[in-house]
Amino acid sequence: MINGKNTAYILLGSNLGNSIELLNLAIAQISLNCGEVELKSSVYKTKAWGNENQNDFLNQVILVKTGLPANFLLEKLLLIENTLGRERKVKWGERTMDLDLLFYENYVLNTPNLIIPHPRLHLRNFTLIPFAEIAPNFIHPVFKKTISQLLENCEDELSVLKF
């Protein structure tokens, strides 16, 4: 914790509507309601993962300094998703906005509502590539490997290109 603020890494994703505008709106809402956005990766165009028969996503990872506890941060992120038109109809389906809390400091948490670190981030290039851009040496508290090392070992072959 630095100056009463915790470091959180959040993955943003959108494949419905004006995705670039939605990413910017989400970042503005996070700044307003969650904490200071200190770093942003480039935006990446990625193939859909898990449910591949849909539009490509735009994804971005941000670092936020927040005074909110992890569970309250998640609540705020879910509200922002809803505000930006997120509808939960199909698992891994199309969405206007998806906000995944990847890490909160180096906490390891497993509750019915929140799992930190995100349980599938090490399997997904669309998360690891933008993450490695802003924090390649961040160490996963469970796997004890850097984001760069996780990326090197990731078997995901879906396309992830700078937008």
Image (cartoon, rainbow, N blue to C red):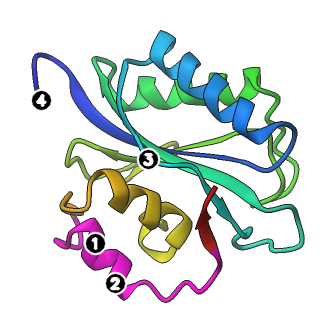
Drawn side of residue 107 relative to residue 157, left or right: left
In primary-sequence order, the first of circles 2 and 4 is 4
Name the kind of residue labelled 1 in the image. Ser
Disc 1 secondary structure class: helix
Q: Amino acid at mark 4?
A: Met
**Residue 56's quadrant in the figure?**
bottom right
Q: Is residue 94 visible?
A: yes
| Residue 83 drawn above or below residue 157 | above
Residue position marked by numbered label 3 in the rendering: 41
Residue 20 placement, left or right of 151: right
User: Which residue carries the number 2 mark?
Assistant: 152
- Disc 1 and disc 4: Cα gap in Å? 23 Å
Give the amino acid at mark 3: Ser
Q: Residues within 10 Å of mark 3 (few under 14, many from 20)?
A: some
Q: Which residues are magenta?
A: 142-159
The vertical placement of 90 against 87, above or below, is below
Element type at marker 2?
Answer: helix
Residue 117 appears in the picture as rendered? no
Residue holding disc 4: 1
Q: State the separation of the CA atoms marked 3 and 2.
A: 18 Å
Q: Earlier in the sequence, mark 1 or mark 4?
A: 4
Question: Which residue does the image show at 43% across and 23% down from the upper left?
Answer: 72
Which numbered disc, 3 or 1, marks the residue that appears first in the sequence? 3
Residues 117 and 148: in front is 148
**Which residue in the structure is indicated by mark 1?**
148
Cβ–Cβ below 8 Å for labels 1 and 2? yes
Q: Considering the image in quadrants, where does the N terminus appear?
A: top left
